[in-house]
Amino acid sequence: MKIDEVPQDHSSTYGGHCKLVYAVDDSGHYLTAQSDGWDAEAFATQLAVAELEAQEQAALAQWRAGQASPLRCLMYRYRLDELGLSQATGLWQWRIRRHFRPDVYRRLPTKILSRYAEAFGLDVAELVRYQQEPA
Amino acid sequence: MTDFQHRQSAHCESGVIANMLTHADLSMSEHMAFGLGSGLAFAYLPIVKLAGLPLIAYRMPPRHIIKTLSKRLGARLTTATYGSPERGRQALDAALDAGRLTGMQTSVFWLPYIPEQMRFHFNAHNLLAYGRDGDDYLLSDPVLEEAVRCPVESLQKARFAKGALAPKGLLYWVDDVPLEHDWETLVRKSILSTTRIIDSAPLPWIGIRGIQHLAAQVRKLDPANVKYNRLYLTHIVRMQEEIGTGGAGFRFMYASFLEEAGALIGAEALREASQKLTLIGDDWRQFALACVRWCRSKEDRGGFLEVAAILERIALAERALLKDLSLWSKGKR
C-alpha cells in the first residue's frame, strides 16, 4: 500500500478516531500514517453489528409476545451468543437455552440471575423486575 | 510518572511492549517488537468459534509477542494474575504508586472510550496504565491517538471479564532489560522462527497450508446461500483488517520490520524481502476488497473461484518468500 493510497473514508465505525496503518512512500520505504476509515472494512463491521441487532430485534419481539425470556434479547444486545454467554456466566449452554423459556425464567433464583446480570453489566434488580412482568 | 510518552500503534500487544521497552530506555519501534517477537502467522481454527464462525488469525496467539520478545532480549518482566478483583485493583494501585508503567490485559467490550461499533467481546486487549487521578485511571491504549482516562469501575469490569481468554486481571511490568544486544543474531533467530511457524507447521490449518485451506473453504461456498456467505466473507475481512493489524493482516507491519532490521544490520536481502512482502500485503487487501465486492453486489454474484484464486496466489508467494528468508536466516544467502 502506497502512502497516498491509505484510505480516508471517514468511516462511522471508527467513532471519529483514526487508526495507524503501515504504508510505503514512493521509494518503497515504510512509514506509518493515520487512516480515518476504509469502506471495505466499515462495511464488514456494520454487517456484523446489523446481524446482532436483527437478532436482538427478533428476540425482543419474542419476549414481548411471551414466547421467550428477556435473556435471549439481552444476550444479543450485549453482543454475546450462547457460547459467549455460557463462558461469561459459567453456565452450561443447555441450561441457558432452558432459561430462554419464559416459564423457567420466572422461577429462576436471584443467585442465577445475578450471574446473568454480571455478564450483561446490569443491576440484578432489573432482571428480577422482568420476572414479575405479566406474560 | 511524568516522562511517559504515549505513542500510537497499529496493534495493541506489539505497541504495549514497544512502548514499555522504550520507556525502559531500550528504544524500540512497534514493528521491530512485532518482528523480533515473531508475531506473524496465519491460522484457520475451525474449532474455535466466534459468533459461530471459525477463528482466522494473522498473528500468533495473544501474549506470544511479549513472552518471546522479553525472552530474546533477556528482559525480566513481573507478571501476575488475581483471583479476586479487589486484590487486582489494589495491586494495580500499588504498582502505579510505585511509579511503574504497568501493562495489563483487558476485554475490549467494557472499555468506554472504544467506539461503540468496535466493542466486541475480545478479552485479550493490551494497554498501559501510567497513573491515577481521583476516580480515573490514566491509560495509554496503544491503538488510540492520545492517552485516555477510564473510570475505575469500567477498568475493573474490563480486567475481570469472564469467558474465552479471560484476562484474570493480568498485570505486567518491566523490571530490567539489558540495553546492549547482538542485533544480527536476534534478527536471524526471530525470522527463522517465523518461517518455521508459517511454512513448516505440521497442521493443515496453520501457515501456508492454512491459507490454502481457507482458499478451499471459500471455493466450496454455495453461491445460493447468500446470507451465510455474506457473514462468512465479512468475518474474514474483519479478522484481517478491523482491529490493530496495520493493514493486510499484519503483512505490512512485518514488511516494515524487515526493512528496519535490514537497515540496522546492513542486510540487503531483508530490504528485498520487505518489498516482496509489500506486494503480498497488497494482494491481501485485494482479497478483502473482492470479499466485500461479492457481498455488496445485488445480482450476478458469480462463484468464488476468483476470490479463492487470490488466496492461492498469496499462499504461493508467501511460501517462496519464506523459503528465501529461511535460507538467509541460516546464513546460506
Image (spheres, rainbow, N blue to C red):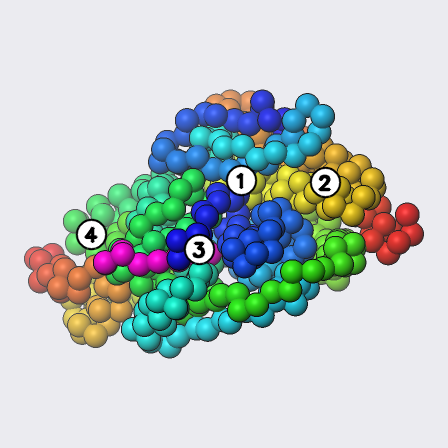
The residue that disc 4 covers is A63
Q: Please identify, in this view, whether the residue under mark 1 or under mark 3 is nearer the observer.
A: 3
Q: Residue furthest right?
A: B332
The residue depicted at 39 percent of the width and 75 percent of the height is: B82
Q: Amino acid at mark 3?
A: Leu
Query: What percent of the width, then of the height, locates residue B263?
Result: 75, 41
Magenta-colored span: B126-136
Q: CA distance from mark 4 to mark 3?
A: 39 Å
Q: CA distance from mark 2 to mark 1?
A: 22 Å
Q: Which mark is residue B199?
A: none
Q: Please tell me whether residue B131 belongs to the stretch shown in magenta.
A: yes
Helix, strand, or loop for circle 1? helix
Query: What percent of the width, then of the height, locates residue B101?
Result: 44, 60
Residue placed most toward the observer, A133 or B41: B41
How many C-alpha atoms fall within 10 Å of the one at disc 4: few (<14), some, or many (≥20)?
many
Task: Determine the chain carrying the residue at label 2.
Answer: B
Q: CA distance from mark 4 to mark 2?
A: 57 Å
The residue that disc 3 covers is B127
How many C-alpha atoms fall within 10 Å of the one at disc 3: few (<14), some, or many (≥20)?
many
